[in-house]
Image (cartoon, rainbow, N blue to C red):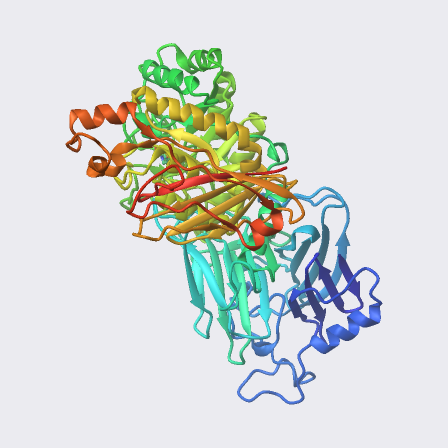
Amino acid sequence: MIRIINNCFALCTKHSAYAFRVNETGHPEHLHYGASLGWTADTPDGVIENDCAAMAEKRSFELGNTVVYSPDHKTVMLEDLRLEAASVGKGDLRDPFAVVRYADGSTTSDFVFEKAELLKGAKAPLEGLPSSHAAEGEAEQLLVTLKDSASGVALELTYTVYEAFDVICRSSRIVNGSGSDIDVLRLMSAQVDFSEDGFELTSFHGAWTREMEKETVPVKHALVVNSSVCGASSNRSNPFVMLHRPQTCESFGEVWAFNLIYSGNHYESAGVNAYGKTRFLNGINPQGFSFRLAPGEAFQAPEAVMCWSDRGFSGMSQCLHGFVRKHITPDEWQGLSRPVLLNSWEASYFDISESKLLRLARAAQGVGIELFVVDDGWFGRRDDDTSSLGDWFVNKKKFPSGLKAFGEKLKAMGLQFGIWIEPEMISVDSELYRTHPDWSMEIPGRAHSEGRNQRILDMANPAVPEYIGSTPAALLKDTGVNYVKWDMNRVFSDVFSQHLPAERQGETAHRYMLGVYRLFDILTKALPGVLFEGCASGGNRFDLGVLCYCPQIWGSDNTDALCRAHIQEGYSYGYPMNCVSAHVSSVPNHQTLRETPLATRFNVACFGSFGYELNLADLPQAELAKIKAQVELYKKWRDVLQNGDFYRLECGSTHKWICVSKDKRRAVGMLMRELAEANTQYEDFKAAGLDPDLTYRFYSTAEKQDIRQFGDLVNTVSPVHIKQNSLAHNLIARFVKLDGEAECAELSGSALMGSGIRLLPSYGGTGFNDRTRCFPDFSSRLFFIEAI
Ligand code: DGJ
């Protein structure tokens, strides 16, 4: 609900309220973002106006050593007023929302209220940028226009209320209404000024193969900044952050979550001012950024997403998961099953050929996999990472009869065909570079610093996305692909567009993103029905901007189940799990050299968009049989795992998760323990998200246990002595399997959620039978929960 009552603005979601008013100097004064204030469509105007008046800042004297806004308003000091959009030069000393440099070189702006209107109909997309989408009736929108009267420059603030998900989106736009060129030096997307301090900021950091490590710091006077300058939203600092109270936990307490629908350099800051008020900002990173606007031109900032919950991190995640699934995920992929895939990368890296891949494909088909993905190495003269990016034509040595014929062979086996591309990049050793050296992002006359032996295409030049959009599009269309993995493997360096004049170089990084979005637009429209998966050396560009085109993103190049459990938990705070691609790979793991059980690799990966990435063709029959059973099981529970509600039940060295179907009748739970501890046998599984009034059957499937796990303890039961790892030991292990434990209980949803189920004890060093959970390092179990 949005209501405008004279100078008061009330924006309400199911559980939250956001309010501001236009004060006596015309500044939009922020009043409240948090718990519902009880306002409904029927609340009398006077009640809302009174509430707003009570929440407004009160002053009777000017503050010492501050700037007074004007002689007529001696008690208005912008430094300590909660604002919707702060600028610089009129007394506000905090981190600003907007900074504009005018023709005379000055940077002082004073944006005051001009008009407000409610926008009708379906939500319009933002110019050149991805944004949340809503059909008519699915969201309400408010547009507030502010003006700097000295220059005529306007600042537009847009608010979109997604009532059911407790989400409010904000975006901003500067329109040059002056008679001269101006430079936008900073334009944020959202600002929230809180009247109090005492918050903590949780953000997610990492590096390649180490994405989404959660970190919490107190917010005090020194500014806390979470940002990226690597050209992409980055694995260093994801744009999703949470402000919360120190006592907020998974199930209780207030949390304000913020994200940005943008895939480039971003900036989030939080800090307390001299008077104990906290300001939060997010938007495009101002470092190195400027954007020139001629008279009449406009600059559109990306859309920010804000969510408030007082039901802890879990409540907030539930809201955001629902919001992303409904208003970010492309319409055609909502609720649609994603295929189980096999990716060739960790199976054979660059060493691919039609014959090798067909062998792999036959193995994939044999275990029930549905989609076969040819990763890097199929094009140009690509045998390693030193060449061919930009040459999007098939390597005839590797695929003598072409890709189309290869795809047809896959289809004849009943497999869908997927392919990898990295369309934003160029190798110096490529036909494309030899023809268009000016299309590479580099500074003529300066030595270039490369990454992964490749350079970045200058997407700020509009000719580049158009050209790149047409070449692979034609090939992929002709090939009949069902899936495209869109990779991006470079951190920016030598940022420069040979297409832009000197005074516009500050636009390069943002114009690059506009070019990339244009390319996403061209390719996704040229290939309707094709599933696009985002990727950037794993999770170097995992954000809501990419998710507007790609329903799923490869979460990390780290496929180790233990690391993945942490990485997926990290993503789960702000992103639904079906956005996170996750694969079962071989052991020892290629990133950590760790050996985890096949069951654990499956149990962790099946909560994401699921697939395999290992050389199935080399696996023994016994492993293949297990994988076949996993795929069968996954298909049985796919709808729950892909479209259900995911809850973190416990994170740390023990991981407990549950995913519950929309109708709450089916759920899959997971328990994983990192390292075994002696004599800690008892474990509960306390569910979430179920229907308290339903009765459920809770069960697990008994797995046969290999006697070799018990080492030479075999001699405690064997009538003859068996030497460990001897031929005899291995032979017995082949034929004698021990029965594993199977959970089986019937209980109410309220008991399962309120108290939890006491699981069968794990092995404690004193004996083993079929009621004992054999649970060495990295073990896990899946639990199935069905309403009776
Ligand atoms: C980085 C990706 O994250 C990997 O999955 C793989 O596609 C390689 N690039 C290929 O070069």
x then y, percent, for residue 782: 46, 39
Whether residue 14 is visible here, answered yes or no, is yes
Question: Does 19 sit above or below residue 759?
Answer: below
Whether residue 522 is visible here, answered yes or no, is no
Residue drawn at point x = 50 percent, y = 16 percent = 478
Question: Does 329 sit above or below residue 466?
Answer: below
x then y, percent, for residue 767: 30, 43
For ligand 1, the image quadrant comes to: top left
Residue drawn at point x = 42 percent, y = 20 percent = 367
Taking the image as shown, residue 20 lies to the left or right of residue 282, namely right
Question: Does 465 sit above or below residue 285?
Answer: above
- Please tell me how many numbered marks the rendered image carries: 0
Viewer-proximal residue, 231 or 743?
743
Q: Quadrant of residue 522?
A: top right
For the C terminus, give its image quadrant: top right
Question: Does 326 sit above or below residue 248?
Answer: above
Viewer-proximal residue, 787 or 382?
787
Viewer-proximal residue, 60 or 680?
680
Residue drawn at point x = 43 percent, y = 18 percent = 365
Taking the image as shown, residue 503 lies to the left or right of residue 615, namely right
Q: Hey, which residue is sitting farthest front in the picture?
A: 719
x then y, percent, for residue 611: 44, 30
Viewer-proximal residue, 741 or 246?
741
x then y, percent, for residue 286: 47, 59
Residue drawn at point x = 48 percent, y = 25 percent = 632
Q: Quadrant of residue 628?
A: top left
For the N terminus, give its image quadrant: bottom right
Taking the image as shown, residue 163 lies to the left or right of residue 776, namely right
Taking the image as shown, residue 229 lies to the left or right of residue 688, namely left
